[in-house]
Amino acid sequence: MTDRSPRTAAAAPDRRRRRLVLAACSMSMLIVVLDFTAMNVALPTVQRDLHTSVAGLQWTLTAYGLVLASLQLLAGSTGDRIGRRRTFQAGLSLFGLGSALCALAPSLEWLVVFRVLQAIGGAVLAPVSLSIISNTFTGERERARAIGLWSGVAGIGLVAGPLLGGVLVGSTGWRSIFWLSLLVALGALVLTTRYVPESKAARPRRIDPVGQLLVLTLLAPLCYAIIEAPQRGWGDPMILAALALAAASVTVLPLWERRSAEPLIDLRFFHSVRFSLAVVIALGAAAACSAFLFLATLYLQDARGFSALRTGLWMLPMAVATAGCALLAGRLTGNHGPRLPLLISGAAVTGSGLVFTLLHAESSAGPLVLAGYLLIGVGYGMFAAPVTHMVVSGMPRAQAGVAGGIAMTSRLVGQTLGIAVTGALLSAGLHHRTHVGLAVFAEASCSAWWVVTGCGVAVLVLGVLATTRWAARSSRRTDALPQPEAGPADGQTDGPAGGPAADDEAGHRARGRL
């Protein structure tokens, strides 16, 4: 029997530890996404149980989404500054506490309040978990694969949520969704405490309270306006006030960030074509996928009369395709760069929208729906890993939390936009229709499916542009921008000399193939 060398013996537990770190991060993303999608199918039951109106019920999703989208950048920069494990543990604890309180909520008002508490914790989990992964998996290939798995788990939560929600609501009630989230949060907290090392930026950046406030006053009213406008109308005073506040914030934000010595968002990194296009691709792909899920769910439940459980079962092919393609996308990105998975994603999303524009005859509905679900599963699974990798690699490792926040914010805003725009188009098509049958729904939703198709085309075209030599040259120019010299930091930094901390001190890590 041959003895293993000391290096090999040491590498085995190190690999095991990193896998457990990845498991904790992936579990956190699963519950954040799952609690959003599973609640969709639980809403009718919640309405009956808590005796509330449809308008009031909508806030259980709206409040959750608003807080998630608005606090991403603040949470990411906080993790980089005070410690990623400490911040991650706080996020898991808040999310778990919020889940337990949601399960015990006696009324709709308390449920909305506890959902906000959940979302505050959830806003921490997404960017900080990505930051932990970026600083744990330092090799380009292994980082791309880890991000692919992390993204795949989030994708599974997105598309499997309706199925799991239908099973739980039908068997034990809607409150069991939150008890399950609590158990997963506790499991992730145990893994984090035992296996995730503490890390922070080698030179903690100063807090930019004005920049953080401007981001909050940009995203919160913008998301509010997008979500509420289809019901209130675009001329409603509250909608106009929200849009005016968002417009003022987006005007002042770049002016302030350019003047700040250590801005929340270093706008110079948007000089990188790859970084900028990756953010836009994330927004477009997320808009297409969330719109598809929204429209297809309404088609199955309202037009075809399926139950919540049966609707979830029809979405199972999408979940399988998303999980498999997310793993494949991570490997493709690590071995060959992001172009191929981005092209596959754009083509698949385009195809899924086109398939549903052909939805006219009931006889062909089944095969068309399954084909559309498979295509959108491929599209969603393929886009997350290369886009997230491009965004994270486009910023210094000292700002990995901010990079994760930008990536997640663009996706969350995209999801909100996708549902709001297609929902408004569908509502206009169904106006004055008393009965929603297959033919009526197919006609009313046709323009909305063309929006999904257009988003897929945008992902395809921008994916090509983001991986050209021209984009690579702009990325190298961004690499050359001066970074603040590293200073002393309390506790463990991103790594020893020559490791991740050294990367922070030097600025960007060498990207290799992007």
Image (tube, rainbow, N blue to C red):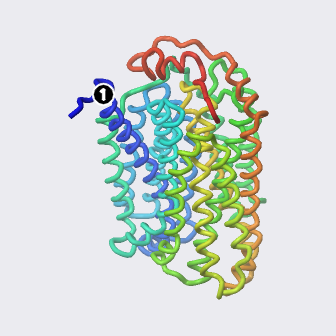
Q: Mark 1 packing: few (<14 Cα in 10 Å), some, or many (20+)?
A: few
Does 422 appear above or below 137?
below
479 vs 450, left or right, is left
Where residue 481 appears, as percent x and y from the top left, is: 69, 19
Res 60 visible: no
Secondary structure beneath disc 1? Answer: helix
Q: Where is residue 237 shown, x and y percent of the image?
A: 74, 55
The residue at the point 52 percent across, 74 percent down is 314
Tell me if 421 is positioned left or right of 328 in this view.
right
* Residue 513 in view (yes/no): yes
In the image, residue 110 above or below residue 119? below
Say which residue label 1 marks.
10
Indicate left or right for 383 with 347 as reference: left
Q: Is residue 115 above or below residue 336?
A: below
Residue 312 at x, y percent in the picture: 48, 72
Q: Residue at x 39, y 62 (%)?
A: 177
Residue at horizontal 57 percent and vertical 33 percent from the top = 402
Q: As shown in the figure, which amino acid type bears the numbered disc 1?
A: Ala
Is the C terminus in the top left, top right, bottom left or bottom right quadrant?
top right
Q: Nearer the viewer, residue 191 or 182?
A: 191
